[in-house]
Image (cartoon, rainbow, N blue to C red):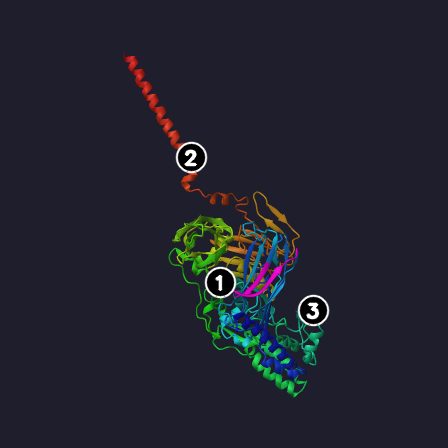
Amino acid sequence: MTQTGRRSFLVVSSVLALASSAAAGAADSAAGQFTEWTGDSTVSRQMTLRQLGFRQPLVLSGQESQREVYLPVPVGVPTRDAQLQLDGRYVRGHTGRTSGLWSVDGDPMAARSITDAQGDASQLLAIDGEPRENGFVRVGVGWWSIVSDYRCADQSAPANVLRLSPDSRFSYRFDGRAVDTVAKAWGALPPRVRLLVEGKALQASTYDAAWRIGAALQTGGKQVDVVALPKVGDSVDLTGINIPASLQGVPAYATLAAGERAHAIKDLAEVGALLSLRDSGPLAADVMIGSDALRNGVRAALDALAAQVGASGADAASAFSTWRAADMAALEKPVANASVSVTTVAGRPTLVVDPAAGGKVAGLLSEQWRNYALGRSLQVTQAVAPAMEGDRVLLSRLGNIAGTQDIVTRGDRSATFELGALSADGRLPEEVVLDVSAAPNAAGQGAVATIYFNDYLLGAKVLSADGKPQRLVAKVPTYALSARNEVRVSFLRQPARPYCHDPATAFPVSILPSSHLKLAKRTLGADFIGAASQLAHANEVFVPATWLQDAPASLAKVIAIASAVGASPEAASLKVVDAGAAISPTRPYLAFALAPSGVSLAGLKNGQLVIAGKPQPLLDLSGLQRAAAVQVASAGGQIGVLYSDLGTEGPVLAAPFRLLRGDLAVIDGSDVVRDFDSQDPYGSRIAQEGNPQSKWEQHMVWLLLLVGVVVFALAAARITQVRRRRKSANVGH
């Protein structure tokens, strides 16, 4: 059987198996439902390309265009019913032949000939359930247009375009019990993670662990929703909830099934019912801070639910007890000597974190160490970033950038890194040093290598056509630095056809392992970039004590701002102080609704936004709502970032963002950041620092002028001296 045939067989077989199990497992009683849940650990995942970071449509156009999308799946875990529904449309302004090709992991899955001027190009791709050791499914989309059968004609076809929607959906199922290590559990997390804590009001230890783990998740590319275990009287959102009909004879489930979207909890049994639901419940958490208070709350809720289920009969009580022991024990009993463990909760793989080890677990979940978490229950004694030694860092240590690829027209490779990870002792990237080699094309021409740093083009070179290694060096200006940085190398070729009917052929290029960043001592200003370089190491986080009473709302702000400025969660120290009190930082710091003595917040409690200036404020604005001000301030020799809400309601910080420029920003929960540099409002400093001329070149004109003045003065003095001598000689005669 061919590979394509084998994959099709696997997909069809998994669909038939699912249908058979669903028909056989339809529960008609509470006892049957809990029995079914006990034996079923299937987890469903669905995500859109937008949730995976593709905020704009993918557009393919012209004669030939190809794109690849990497879809995350649990590492080394078989999947079932995996499919990608690609929503797309096409327009075809050029006649001729146009076609599309869709592939999975390089295996062609669907092809289509396009004949109409415009239309629907949606495509459903079935994906086999083979485990992926790299944690990704690679989906390729190709678009080709042949305008004329005469091969020497222009085939550019710019008006033949395929547009793929970012709302395209990827879904799959997997066995939650197959996720048996913390590393696999990380790969199994959805794009939007629910982090469960013990309640709306938290102890300082739980709050501390929650913000650290949330920041580690968000830095790792996840969005985080902090969810509190509700109490009687609390309101919960029942959107999307699915209550099996077999359980609606139990009062708690019946109440939830009939409840409105915003439902007030009437008794603890309803909390137990919400905990028992699988992917559809608002308490279906992916990560939990395993405090004693959370365990006691879960135990009380399940006890209340057990009493209601027991009233349905002995069979229901027995089935519930068996299910509880199998699926909920991890929430009720602490894992001995474990900083972090992966357990099965209501059929889902769930990470449970010890509150006392939040910082160490955050370090383990960093990109540096998470792949080493090869165990179900781990005791983390230490997990910190390695100290920088020397002044060079290989690009291959920052991302999978080194290697060889065949290029027809263009190919890109990139590596990303946090600025603070390289900024120890004030050392920051000064140069990008790129070692490359490229084979010449059929016409003997070399490729063009281009270096980008955060989308700024720093340097480019036409490579020699001898295929030998070459070195490119590009200076990194200060304005190009960011809290999170990307180095991208792009290779461009002009397709060579010695004869016009020859096909365009790919030729190899390589980025060599010796490519690196060179670090040097650099002075940064009191702005967000300067703060990011300091906050990546030992830092302090100040929050008012009142924020611990509404933890889900305030944690969302702490997590978002810590991630936006690149603050290290593993190296931080949480300080809970009285609201309104002045703080005294001893390290680089984050402060929320607090400020050091003598430093005023840009955002005041009455919604007033003030941007200081001399002799009067530059901006004084009131009436703002659902917005916040973030500013950089120095106190006691320490640089820090201050956060303050504008108005009575602060923003809901759902979309991730970065603070990149200036020393003041206004945010409203969207991905738009309105920044301002009060120290350099017109950018004159950036213009000066970005001058590509060397110091000698910058001052050469003045030096030449000075030399000219000196030469002129010497010449004038010489002429005067000669005249005096002649005059004296004439007088003597």
Quick check: 388 above or below 256? Answer: above
In terms of depth relative to the viewer, which is nearer, 624 or 83? 83
In what quadrant of the picture does the C terminus appear? top left
Where are the magenta residues, as a range?
99-117
Badge number at residue 261: 3
Q: Is residue 395 left or right of residue 661?
A: left
Of the two numbered discs 2 and 1 on the same chain, state the one appearing first in sequence: 1
Q: Residues within 10 Å of mark 2 (few under 14, many from 20)?
A: few
Q: Look at mark 1 in the image and give the residue it sits on.
A: 572
Q: Residue at x 52, y 57 (%)?
A: 565
In magenta stretch: residue 110? yes
Type of amino acid at the residue the image marks with label 2: Trp
In magenta stretch: residue 111? yes
Type of amino acid at the residue the image marks with label 3: Arg
Of the two numbered discs 3 and 1 on the same chain, state the one appearing first in sequence: 3
Q: Look at mark 2 in the image and give the residue it sits on.
A: 702
Q: Residues within 10 Å of mark 3 (few under 14, many from 20)?
A: some
Badge number at residue 107: none
In terms of depth relative to the viewer, which is nearer, 651 or 43? 43
